[in-house]
Each structure stands twice: as C-alpha cells, then as structure tokens.
Amino acid sequence: MKEKIQIRRLIKEDKEKYLKLKDINKDLFEKRLKQTKDYLDETFVAILDENIVGEVTLRKDSGRYFLINEEIPEIQDLYVKEEFRNKGIGTKLIKFCTNEACIYSDKLLIGVNISNINAINLYIKNDFNFFSKIVSLEKEKIIEENENIVYNEDLAFFLIKDLTI
C-alpha cells in the first residue's frame, strides 16, 4: 500500500514537528513562517502520517547576480529526511513548486552543490537543465574556464526549468 504524502504551506502549528525535521533552530522557523506569511518566500512541507518528512522553499525572485533584468523564482532548501528518500517525496515537492512558480514565471531556477550528484540527478529527472558554469556563491561570481579553484561547499551549479513546456 502506497502512503499518501500531503504537500502544503508551512503554518504556525507546524513548529514542533518542523524543528524535528533536521537541525533547525526556532529563529529559522520564525523567519520562514514570516516570509511565507509576507509572500516573499514560501516554505512548503511534505506531511506523512502527520509528521513533516520534507521541506522546500520557493523564492519568488532569486535575485541572483547573473540573472540581469530577470525575475526568476528559485527553489531553495529542498530537503527530505534520509529515511524517506527515494520514495518520490523530493519529486512531489519540486512539482508543487513548479505549479506555484508557473503562475508568475515561465522559468524556475535551482542551485546545487557541485558534489551533490543525487540532487543533480533528481533535478535532471524533473526536467531541469544546466544553466550556468560553476558558481562561487560566496564571491558571487561565475568560475571561468582554466581558473584555479579550491573545492569547498561554496561551489554550485544552477539548473533551470522551462515552465512553458
């Protein structure tokens, strides 16, 4: 029997369950709740048997420096508890964000650490295509070909999805 996953917006009553999702402090919960309430960013949660097993934040305008004059929404902080991975929950969260984003944009952006092969494969499976070269998030710059770099958690790829298809 397949278990039913519900995806919905983060609400105030989620606080205790949300704090158990991963190492999240109360301040981050309050920030995400306020941003969702103010419609700046929206955080959605995946519910299974009344427990929060995943989350994702949809930023209405990524504000990335390499997107000059474009307001493209961005998926951020996609997370599924380890014991619930490979059950379609990440895909459901992505599809939920895709449906939300297509209301006000024809594209959707997502960033991923260059070493996170599982996430990169998930995004490609969900029709995202590579959009950028390697980006240094800390320095806010695209790494040029032949540029010497030292690997760290700061390096990311960005992928984009065409929502008109």
Image (cartoon, rainbow, N blue to C red):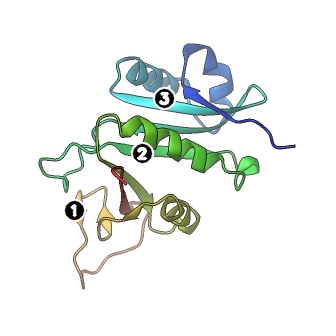
Earlier-in-chain disc, 3 versus 1: 3
Tell me the element at label 2: strand
Query: Could you tell me the amino acid type at mark 2?
Result: Ile
Q: Residue at x 62, y 14 (%)?
A: 13
| 1 or 2: mark nearer the eye | 2
Identify the element where label 3 is drawn: helix
| Quarter residue 129 falls in | bottom left
| The quarter of the displayed image where residue 35 is located | top left
Q: Nearer the viewer, mark 2 or mark 3?
A: 2
Name the residue carrying label 3.
28
Is the residue under label 2 in contact with that under label 1 (CB below 8 Å)?
no
Q: Amino acid at mark 3?
A: Leu
Mark 1 vs 2, N-terminal side: 2
Name the residue that disc number 1 marks. 141
Camera-side residue of 111 and 99:
99
Name the image quarter holding the N terminus: top right
Residue type highlighted by circle 1: Lys
Up-down: is 34 above or below 125? above
Most extreme residue toward the top is 13
* Residue shown at the point (24%, 80%) measured from the top left: 147
Q: Say if 88 sits above or below 43 in the image.
A: below
Report, in whole angstroms, how far the alpha carbon at label 3 lies from the one at label 1.
27 Å
In the picture, the disc for residue 75 is: 2
- Tell me if residue 157 comes above or below residue 55 in the rendering: below
In three-dimensional space, the C-alpha distance between marks 1 and 2, rounded to whole angstroms, equals 20 Å
